[in-house]
Amino acid sequence: MKNSLTPFFSPRGIAIVGASSHPEKLGYGVARNLNKSGYTGAVHYINPKGGNIFGQEILKSIAEIPAPVDLAILVIPAKYAPDTMRACGERGIKATILVSGGFRETGKEGAALEEKVVKIAREFDIRMIGPNCIGLIDTNLPLDTTFLPLEMPRPGHVAFISHSGAICDALIDWSKKQGFGFSRIISLGNQADVNETDVLPLVAADEHSKVITLYLENINDGERFIKNARKIIPEKPIIALKTGRSESGQRAAASHTGAMAGADIAFEAAFEKAGIFRAETTEEIFDWARALAWASPLQGRRIGVLSNAGGPCVIAADALDREKLQLADFTPETNQAFADFLVPAASFQNPVDMLAGATAADYAKGLEILLADPNTDGIIVIIPPPPMYPAEYIADAIIPLIHKAEKTVVVVLMGGEEIEEASHRFQAAKVPEYRFPERAVSALTRLAERTEILREMDESTTPLVDADLSDTRAALKSTPSGNWLDIELAERLMKIYGIPTSPIKLAQDAKSAAKLGEELGFPVVMKIASPDIPHKSDVGGILLNVKSAEEVAQGYEMLMARVQAKISHPSLRSEYRRAKLEGVHIQKMIPQGQEVIVGAVRDPQFGALMMFGSGGVEVEGLKDVAFALAPLSVKETEKMLSKTWAGKKLAGYRNIPAVDRAAVIDILCRLSQLAYDLPEIAEIEINPLTVLKKGAVAVDVRILKAE
Amino acid sequence: MKNSLTPFFSPRGIAIVGASSHPEKLGYGVARNLNKSGYTGAVHYINPKGGNIFGQEILKSIAEIPAPVDLAILVIPAKYAPDTMRACGERGIKATILVSGGFRETGKEGAALEEKVVKIAREFDIRMIGPNCIGLIDTNLPLDTTFLPLEMPRPGHVAFISHSGAICDALIDWSKKQGFGFSRIISLGNQADVNETDVLPLVAADEHSKVITLYLENINDGERFIKNARKIIPEKPIIALKTGRSESGQRAAASHTGAMAGADIAFEAAFEKAGIFRAETTEEIFDWARALAWASPLQGRRIGVLSNAGGPCVIAADALDREKLQLADFTPETNQAFADFLVPAASFQNPVDMLAGATAADYAKGLEILLADPNTDGIIVIIPPPPMYPAEYIADAIIPLIHKAEKTVVVVLMGGEEIEEASHRFQAAKVPEYRFPERAVSALTRLAERTEILREMDESTTPLVDADLSDTRAALKSTPSGNWLDIELAERLMKIYGIPTSPIKLAQDAKSAAKLGEELGFPVVMKIASPDIPHKSDVGGILLNVKSAEEVAQGYEMLMARVQAKISHPSLRSEYRRAKLEGVHIQKMIPQGQEVIVGAVRDPQFGALMMFGSGGVEVEGLKDVAFALAPLSVKETEKMLSKTWAGKKLAGYRNIPAVDRAAVIDILCRLSQLAYDLPEIAEIEINPLTVLKKGAVAVDVRILKAE
């Protein structure tokens, strides 16, 4: 157990090592900002050159620092970092921020130096943020350890954790013009010790942080990240921008499942598993954050729209449609109430257009009517610059109603200079306001999803199988790393986890093939047996509907000859040329059903990533697949199915008859437990899983052992 | 031919009818704005009450207005509109703006009044903008006929045409804080006379308007709109926000094609045909407009990125990837040039991260290097607030380079207060600048597409068939409106347009069925003949691979009995219950190939809308379809195919063999000409079109006559 991170945000005293009185030095910037921040504890300055700063003596060594001191900010040349860290340790300082660059980000030598520093920190039980970071801000404590020549952001309810210091810099400056504030900002830099997962509980515990936002370039310990996030989500929403999508190409993989599961898909699945909102753009993060911090979750998706003009109403209606929110169907009482006070040319239906003559009192009356309608869950009030009076009149009229309301209200203030004062008033009143309907609707959608996420989070996955895996583990050991499990072992695993298979037997000559066919019962399917040929149809290695012992015997000879000829052909993929043909697999033919693929691939960060998709070439051609992290709950599996055409077809579509959808869900859950239980396995693919009217059968199961 | 619209933007004199000296009246607002605008022609005020305004006498009647007067702005109660319009006509005024509301937008009576006004206008050859609009602004003439209590927008290069006055109001105000200006603004209101298509040439002809933006709620005359837009696009880009997507549900339609082609799909196809950029959000319009107005089109998609921090670079790289732009591969000389002046820890690869210490001179040097690299087509310069000096230093250093450059440069200025001055300098220098990389990349993408659109626009569609349609037209007349054409006529049309079909014969008893089978040659396909049953497989109405005369005879009896039983069954769709069975169609069986659907549906605004998609249930289940407007060029057809999985499969995929893709393109082009030539036809569907190794055959052709 690592020691606590709390000193970072409640230090009784702070040392700035490398403090300088030269304004162009970063060591000056840190001293200046910490002083200006209003931090009330003791501040100590250290620099071997000594001197004075802000009328206080600069100490020459860390050893001289008087108590209390809990946190050291190191703004020193990289090469001095190891000795400085040791001096901190000897002085009993347990929390450090290594601001300096010159480590891992510069190459090999820097990485070695970074490792050296971390080793010393561990030795002394010191936690370290950085290196190569801009440190911390807490607007409520207050505390500012950055060197940026910026005023502190205004106090607010959004916590921001970032892998990039420049993004912090830009966002602090941007937020001031956008009218929102931050509670805590943490710049993590190279994350040589403290990482995003470590600091999540630290901001979650802060009463001022009502929503947590993340700028991530990677995640170091995926499973712990998800665990920490899931603990926080019921209390506080988390929004993440994960960059580096473009770098996450396809994996080198042996199965369809592996080939389709790019690294970014694992992040997507991880955020979904944890209940984290994933933003596509920087602006989205804070559009959503303001709504999540200030407004309550939407209890449903039925939205009322109130405006004084038609154009913005249509834009809002389009945006609602795009985000799958609904224009609420008003009760007749609501329509009547509007008819009673609006001019006849106004629109009393949703969206309500009160026309350009609407007064601030009309807006208030309209909002009251919409809040009272039992068919609305949330309201959007749209305010283009009113032609005859200032927009802040409307703000003053409706803010008290919004504060009293039990339903969520967001405001669209369209314009620039004319609505600026109104915008300030809404911000001061903590009412989420946006310039355009599209962005307000995007934020509202997150409020609706928040309710849905909280509802779904209660369902935990309980293991379906309580298997004794000791024999299996031993058997797995006998398969060489990076190889396919032999077919018997794969079948045994399916049996342990309760996944029905169609028995498959290996014949090594025509005669025994015929005999096996008789034992299994006709018709049978014959497939070339070779662990080196994953796509058997590519080499003509499959015979369907073989109906008698004679046909099986002939089929055996034919398959062996045909595949041998095919794989020797120079036009074929070179990896097949060395393929070993072990004989022919005989399997009872399964009645026709729907064919789907299910699979699993081990992600280095997040563990077993499950796949469901269309059978046949469509899985890759059409990319008709969905992914989710193991272990799967029934609801998570339902969601996977509903994302794909293959999943929809299972319930029947036009002349395609319905098959046993529940069996597929059960099998996916079981397979996810298998993949979760056995990290020795790199990839599993059942292709096809044939889904029948009753039940489903894993016709071809391939399992790859991890390297 | 309607008369010219030029008086609207070059009136030698303007009359304000309904002018008022009471500041709370709209008639005062119009007078005030026109005066303040700097309009240099004569302004005349008319009000039967007389009086004075701005030291000038208010005339009591329109007849009294002295020459010159070319434009009248009518700010009067709706009921006086007809007489006022007549008075304008009698005075010889040919251009009017009817500002007042109280017409079509208020219901039936208002609509009748509007029609009356239009009739009078037509009588006198008067063109009218409105009613229910805010009029015109020209920032260069200058001219402002609105009543809004706003300063005129600053002069700029963006023209804006809007169906909504409130949107104009909001955008004028918003634009001032965003730092861009407008050339012309036209609020069209109810478009009782002048509509969006009419005014397109009017803004296109304005030298100050470099890009045309549209806010549209509908389009009145689709074909002319496309024609006008296509004429303008080679000179000036057009961006449209078309709202009302959510209202455009599915059509009532008889075919898959019709069912899939929602009204919004026709707009999408129209914008694509015309080469118009379609924005999803209001902010996108102006993000794109600034880039299109100020920067030259990108000659390719290879982008260099220059920054002083890593985080923003990764965001930019992700955005480039999402928009299918590429990170340029630098030449070795470029990498070397960066290595020569940057510190070793910087990143010399694309995106270039010069690190936080980068000076304004470094930015300039870096930009020069990137501009000189033959592998870059455009550059994004990203500037988070520099920690040690103001951002405007960078603006001053790079603006001269950007002005000199032949390549496109866009700037991302991340922040708020710290970058405000830099932002003003870039705006003044007409350099497109954005707050976040995502939005800059979105704008760059339009610059790349602009080049591609211009390149593709040269290709015009030349008719493939020069058919004499007089006989066909006569035959079409004999089919009742809203009915399916009989199979012979449908086949005849296919023949005229050179679309291969598989001959199909109607048998009305078992014996003649057997004979027809022998004539066609076995195997054959048998299908129940009933114009009332579009989906024959739903009722078991198809027999495949029938191999002999006896089988055909038996098949006939069986099909008739089976379908009769099926359609009488109470569980079946009620419309089938009255279906008339005419016999059985016999058709030679086509060899196996890929099955696709091609079709056409007549859109009331835009004419024939062509469809291509997956055969079978996937067309609707998977929505694997693409649409484009007739007549189709080969390139447009290629694009349709490339949008669908069905189209990709034609070229072969894994074990699916390639088929004759060119034949499909040829057939779609021919079918589009047919649909274009014959407006009497409401829907056509070839389902399936069987695509073979060589050629393609329309196996089932259904054609619906228009109502």
Image (cartoon, coloured by chain):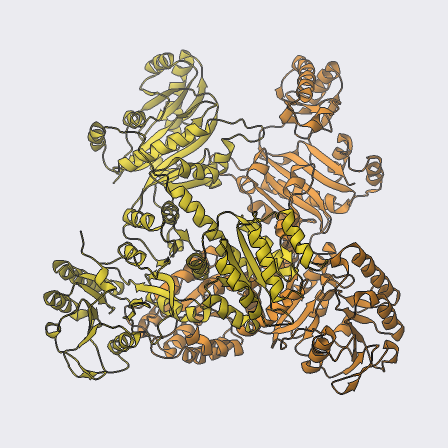
Chain colours: A yellow, B orange
Q: What quarter of the picture does the C terminus of chain A occupy?
A: top left
Specify whether A184 is left or right of A112: right
Specify whether A586 is left or right of B600: left
Q: Compared with residue A616, is residue B680 higher up or lower down, i.e. above or below?
A: below
Could you say where residue A283 lies in the image, as x and y percent from the top left? 45, 62
Asked whether the viewer can see residue A32, the reply is: yes
Q: How many marks?
A: 0
Q: Compared with residue A371, is residue B286 higher up or lower down, i.e. above or below?
A: below
Asked whether the viewer can see residue B299, the reply is: no
Q: Quadrant for residue B532, please give it.
A: top right
Query: Quick one: B228 or A325, which is closer to the camera?
Result: A325
Query: Quick one: A504 or B161, which is closer to the camera?
Result: B161
Q: Quadrant for residue A293, please give it.
A: bottom left
Query: Quick one: B354 or A584, which is closer to the camera?
Result: B354
Q: Compared with residue B107, is residue A543 higher up or lower down, i.e. above or below?
A: above
Query: Quick one: A562 or A97, which is closer to the camera?
Result: A97
* Outermost bottom residue: B55
Specify whether B68 is left or right of B657: right
Could you say where residue B388 lies in the image, as x and y percent from the top left? 33, 78
Could you say where residue B591 lies in the image, as x and y percent from the top left? 60, 28
Q: Compared with residue B272, is residue A189 higher up or lower down, i.e. above or below?
A: below
Residue at the spot 57% in from the left edge and 69% down from the top edge: A393
Could you say where residue A321 lies in the image, as x and y percent from the top left? 57, 50
Residue at the spot 39% in from the left edge and 38% down from the top edge: A611
